[in-house]
Image (cartoon, rainbow, N blue to C red):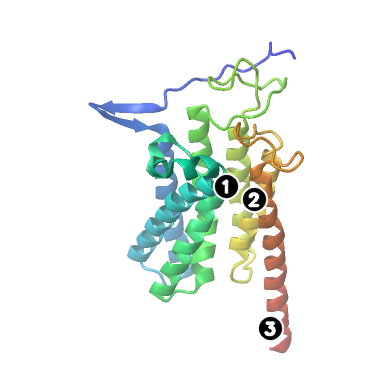
Amino acid sequence: MNWFHAIPYPNISPVFFELGPLQFRWYGLMYLIGLASAYFLITRRVESKGLPLTRDQVYDMVVWAALGVFIGGRVGYTLFYNFAYYVQHPVKILAVWEGGMSFHGGLLGVIVALFWFSRRQHIPSYTVADLAAAATPIGLGFGRLGNFINGELYGRATDVDWCMVFPHGGPVCRHPSQLYEAGLEGLLLFTLLWIVAKTLPPPGTIFWSFIAGYGLCRMVVELFREPDAHLGFILGSFSMGQLLSLPMIVVGILMLALGYQRRASMQAKS
């Protein structure tokens, strides 16, 4: 395999600022940027559409979503990706500084947190779900840039001209799959959801479009991403990420079809 044309990995320090014993990391900063962006985007959408949420409610919504991501992501990683290890070392579940988060677990955590929030605030669940889904790709995009800076979740070995040799990926040249994910799950998915929102769809459409769209993007990216070393491929050539994403596509498309069918039925009766 010829790696002569490989692009040098920038090898950015994961710590962008130190203050005594405190270290501020790019990955954490990416999360903060994503959450702040989500808050401003949701606030703007609420005001432009005249939705029944105050700024304080939007703030609380983002906070609950962040808690859902954190708790669900950690629990999901424990269950889906390293269950045998954490059964033997349960205290390590709390060692979040050692890494280990699952998107699919985080998604379930957000759904539970925001469903509870919508019930408590007496706001339609789909109103909250659509607002959150429209803003989520921003956080995903910044999060994948954080993965790239950390040199983690890199791609499979390849000889494409834009391949990179990652510090923790051995001497082989690999796909910069984190950047693929940032482009697909971040920029592309955000754009598609923005277009869907412009069509005045039925309630829940943006949420289910996100579910199906993310599942499809993740299925594609997993073709280039290196499977977790301790898991490998789970079923034939399918990775854990693909197995968890496939139901998202199926359920998302089914719920989209039901939503438009329900609206057509209501219009026919009126």
* Residue 206, position as x, y percentages in the image: 60, 62
| Residue at image location 44% in from the left, 56% down from the top | 68
Q: What residue is shown with label 3? A: 266
Real-space Cα separation, disc 3 to disc 2, in angstroms: 34 Å
Q: Residues within 10 Å of mark 3 (few under 14, many from 20)?
A: few
Label 1 vs 2, first from the N-terminus: 1
- Quarter residue 253 falls in: bottom right
What SS does tag 2 mark? helix
Q: Which residue is mark 2?
A: 244
Image coordinates for residue 31, horizontal then vertical, percent: 43, 43
Say few, some or many: other residues with alpha carbon within 10 Å of mark 2 (under 14 / 14 to 19 / 20 or more): some
Judge depth for marks 3 and 1 and give the one in front: 1
Rate crowding at label 1 as few (under 14), some (14 to 19) or many (20 or more) other CA atoms within 10 Å: some
Residue placed at 52% from the left, 27% from the top? Answer: 151
Lateral position of residue 236 relative to residue 155, left or right: right
Residue 7 in the image: state x and y as whole percent.
61, 18
Q: Which mark lies nearer to you, 3 or 2?
A: 2
Name the residue located 38 percent from the left edge and 32 percent from the top edge.
25
* Secondary structure type for disc 3: helix
- Residue 39 seen in this snapshot: no
Q: Amino acid at mark 1?
A: Phe
Q: Which residue is mark 1?
A: 80
> Which amino acid type corresponds to the residue marked 2 in the rendered image?
Leu
Is mark 1 in CB contact (under 8 Å) with mark 2? yes
Three-letter code, disc 3:
Met
Dots 3 and 1: beta carbons under 8 Å?
A: no
- The disc, 3 or 1, on the residue closer to the chain's N-terminal end is 1
